[in-house]
Image (cartoon, rainbow, N blue to C red):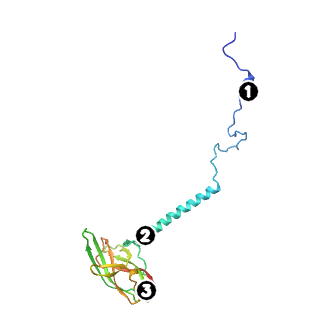
């Protein structure tokens, strides 16, 4: 009488059992060096390394360019406030200002504008087609003055209203004298109400 449990023969067991793969041994049979990690991150190719360096350089250049553009745009915007007082242009002493006066006007919407009017004369030997000025509004608090940087405009006509144009539209030839106007939409609150200083910091000549 045979039992319900059958036993395999040793030959069957030997044929079915496969040797266990040792830790660190590749399927092909070659073993990794002792102490090497089981999973090794893929090495970067030379092209990928160079591409990373190029992308990093491009990103750094973009940031630097953005900063430069911001500074240039801020400095060139009419009425932009710049804390640093720039040196006068070398030709500035050839363009004396006279009859400088201030006035205000209020629009129907309640907005207020402040004007500085005067005359400018070209005592030099060159034609001037652009002038940028810095206006220093002093205070009585011992603080540095507020500095406004903007282009100087020339008055073309007074009637029916005062119309201004850039200097490039009416270049100042040697000996010419013209009326000018500077317009401010906002004046520093701590201004001491004294006529501010006007510095000619950038002059374009032909």
Identify the disc placed on residue 127.
3
Q: Position of residue 63 (x, y in %)?
A: 50, 63
- Element under disc 2: helix
Q: Dot 1 surroundings within 10 Å: few (below 14), some, or many (20 or more)?
A: few
Q: Which residue of the protein is positioned furthest toward the right in this rendering? A: 11
Q: Dot 3 surroundings within 10 Å: few (below 14), some, or many (20 or more)?
A: some
Q: Position of residue 132 (x, y in %)?
A: 40, 78
Disc with the residue nearer the chain's start (3 vs 2): 2
Q: Dot 2 surroundings within 10 Å: few (below 14), some, or many (20 or more)?
A: few
Q: Position of residue 100 (x, y in %)?
A: 31, 83
Distance of mark 3 from mark 2, alpha carbons?
27 Å
- Element under disc 1: helix
Foreground of the two, 151 or 191: 151
Foreground of the two, 129 or 33: 129
Tell me the residue at 44%/69% (across/down). 71
Identify the disc placed on residue 110.
none
Foreground of the two, 127 or 44: 127
Tell me the residue at 58%/57% (across/down). 52
Foreground tag (1 vs 3): 3
Identify the disc placed on residue 73.
2
Q: Position of residue 123 (x, y in %)?
A: 40, 89
- Residue 50's quadrant in the figure? bottom right
Q: Is residue 189 above or below residue 94?
A: above
Q: Are marks 1 and 3 in contact (CB under 8 Å)?
A: no
- Element under disc 3: loop
Q: Are marks 3 and 2 in contact (CB under 8 Å)?
A: no
For label 1, the residue is: 15
- Residue 148's quadrant in the figure? bottom left
């Amino acid at each position: 009488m045979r039992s319900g449990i059958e036993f395999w023969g040793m030959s069957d067991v030997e044929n079915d059992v496969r040797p266990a793969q040792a830790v660190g041994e590749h399927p092909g049979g070659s073993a990794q060096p002792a102490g090497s990690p089981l999973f090794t991150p893929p090495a970067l190719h030379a092209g990928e390394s160079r591409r990373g360096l190029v992308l990093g350089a491009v990103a750094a250049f973009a940031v630097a360019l953005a900063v430069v553009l911001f500074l240039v745009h801020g400095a060139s915007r009419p009425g932009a406030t710049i804390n640093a007082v720039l040196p006068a242009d070398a030709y500035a002493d050839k363009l004396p200002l006279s009859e400088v006066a201030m006035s205000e006007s209020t629009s129907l919407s309640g907005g207020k504008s402040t004007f500085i009017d005067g005359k400018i004369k070209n005592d030099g030997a060159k034609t001037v087609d652009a002038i940028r000025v810095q206006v220093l509004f002093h205070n009585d608090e011992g603080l540095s003055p507020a500095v406004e940087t903007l282009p100087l405009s020339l008055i073309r006509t007074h009637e029916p209203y005062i119309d201004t144009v850039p200097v490039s539209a009416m270049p100042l030839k040697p000996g010419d004298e013209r009326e000018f106007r500077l317009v401010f939409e906002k004046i520093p609150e701590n201004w001491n109400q004294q006529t501010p200083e006007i510095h000619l910091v950038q002059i374009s000549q032909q």
